[in-house]
Amino acid sequence: MIDSKHLKLILAIDRCGSLNKASKELNLTQSALSHQLKNLEEYLGVDVFNRIGNQLYFTAVGKELKERASIILEQYEDLEAKIQEFKESQIDRYIHGYSQREAQRLQDQATSVSEFLHFDSIWEEGSRVLEIGCGVGAQTRIIAKRNPKVHFTSIDIAEKSLQLARKVIKDEQIDNVDFSLQDVRSLRIQKSHQYDHIFICFFLEHISNPLEILKQVRGLVKKGGTITVIEGDHGSTFFHPDDPYAKAVVEAQVQLQKMRGGNANIGRALYPLLDKAGYQKITVSPRQIYVDRSKPALVEGFIRNTFTAMIQGMSEDLLQEGLVSQAAYHRGIDGLLRTAVADGVFSYTFFKGTAII
Ligand SMILES: C[S@@+](CC[C@H](N)C(=O)[O-])C[C@H]1O[C@@H](n2cnc3c(N)ncnc32)[C@H](O)[C@@H]1O
C-alpha cells in the first residue's frame, strides 16, 4: 500500500532533483531509496517517474501523488500532534502532579516504608525486570540496590520525573537500571525481548483502567515470569485520637482521586484484579504500617512527610472541587498531625500482590 515513507520519498526527490541527494536527505542508501520507489511502482502498476538518462521526470500519476503527498503528510503531522497533546493531558491528570515537593514526598515515602514493602522484593540473578510508572526513581533505587545482579528497565510517561530518577541513580552509583520514556498503554514488545518480571508500585491507583493494563502487560513478560504490584488503600487508615475532620479530609482525597479516574482504595482489589486479568498463583500480602511514638523515624517519615504531606499537596484541588471547606481542611490536617505527637497512633495498610504470568 502507499504509506507515509513513499510520500516522503516523492517529496524529497521533488525537492532535491535527484535520487542521490534525496537519499542523503532521508538518511537512506541510494539503493534502499530505489528499492522503495520500485516497490511503490510495482504496487501501483504504473510508473511514478520517467527516467531519461540520470534525470527523473514525474509522470501524470507522479504529479498527482506529489500534489496530494504534502496535504496527506500535513494531516499525519496534525494527527501525531493531537495524540501528543492527548498524552500530555493524561500526564496532567496524574493527581499529585510533578512538583519538587511531590518528588521529595515520593522519596520520603519510599525510604520510610522500604523495609515493609521490599524485604521480599528479590528476583533471581541475571533476570530482567520491567518497572512501570517509576516516577522519580524512589522505589527503583531501593529495589535496584537490593538486587545488584538483576537488570531493571524503568519506564514512565513523564520526562521530568525520569530526569530526577536518572540523577538519583547516578548519585547513588547504581548501575543496573535503564530509564525509558514510555507510555505503558502503547508498549508492545516482541517475544524474544520479553521481560522476566514486572514490578509496579503506586501506579494502578492513578489510572482509570487498571484491569486492561494488567491484561496488556502480561504480554510483556515471558510465560512463567512474575508480576509484583504494590498499592495503597486510604480506606485502611485509622488513628488515635480519632477525629472526624481528619477522617473527612482522607475521604475527600478518596473522592478527588475517583473524580480524576483513579481509585485510592485499590489495595483491597488487587486479588480480584489480578485474578480477572488471568494471572496464576496470586498471593496478596497486606503490609500494615503501624506508627506510635516509639517509632520516631516513621512518625516523621510516614505520618508527617508521606501521608499528611500527600493530603497537603492536594489542598488547592480539594478546596476548588468543594470536597471540603477551608476551615474543615485545616482542622483535618491538624487532626492528622495530632497523631504524630504525644499519645498519637497512626495506621495504614499497603497491599503487595504477586502472581505468575
Ligand atoms: C505515584 S507515581 C509512582 C512513582 C513510583 N512508582 C513510586 O512509587 O515512587 C505514578 C507514576 O506513574 C506515571 N504514569 C502515569 N501514567 C503512565 C503511563 N501511561 N505510562 C507510564 N507511566 C505512567 C506517572 O507519570 C507517575 O510518575
Image: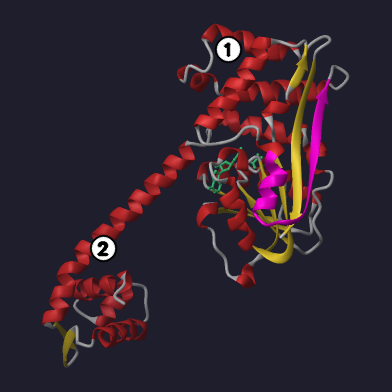
What segment is highlighted magenta in the picture? 269-291
Q: Secondary structure at mark 2?
A: helix
Picture quadrant where residue 171 is located: top right
Amino acid type at mark 2:
Leu
The circle on residue 219 is none
Q: Which residue is at the front of the view, 29 or 287?
A: 287
Q: Which mark is residue 73?
A: 2
Residue 329 vs 62, above or below: the answer is above
Q: Is residue 43 left or right of residue 199?
A: left
Crowd class of label 1 (few under 14; some 14 to 19; many from 20; radius 10 Å): many
Disc sitting over residue 329 in the figure: 1
Determine the residue positioned at 81% across, 60% down: 124
Q: Left or right of 302: which side holds 11? A: left
Which tag, 2 or 1, sits closer to the chain's start? Answer: 2
Q: Position of residue 244 (x, y in %)?
A: 67, 11
The quarter of the picture where residue 194 lies is: bottom right
Q: Nearer the viewer, residue 351 or 6?
A: 351
Identify which residue is drawn at 75% across, 54% down: 355
- SS class of the residue under badge 1? helix
* Left or right: where 13 falls relative to 173: left
Place of residue 78 in the rendered image (x, y in percent of width and height, measured from the top left): 29, 54
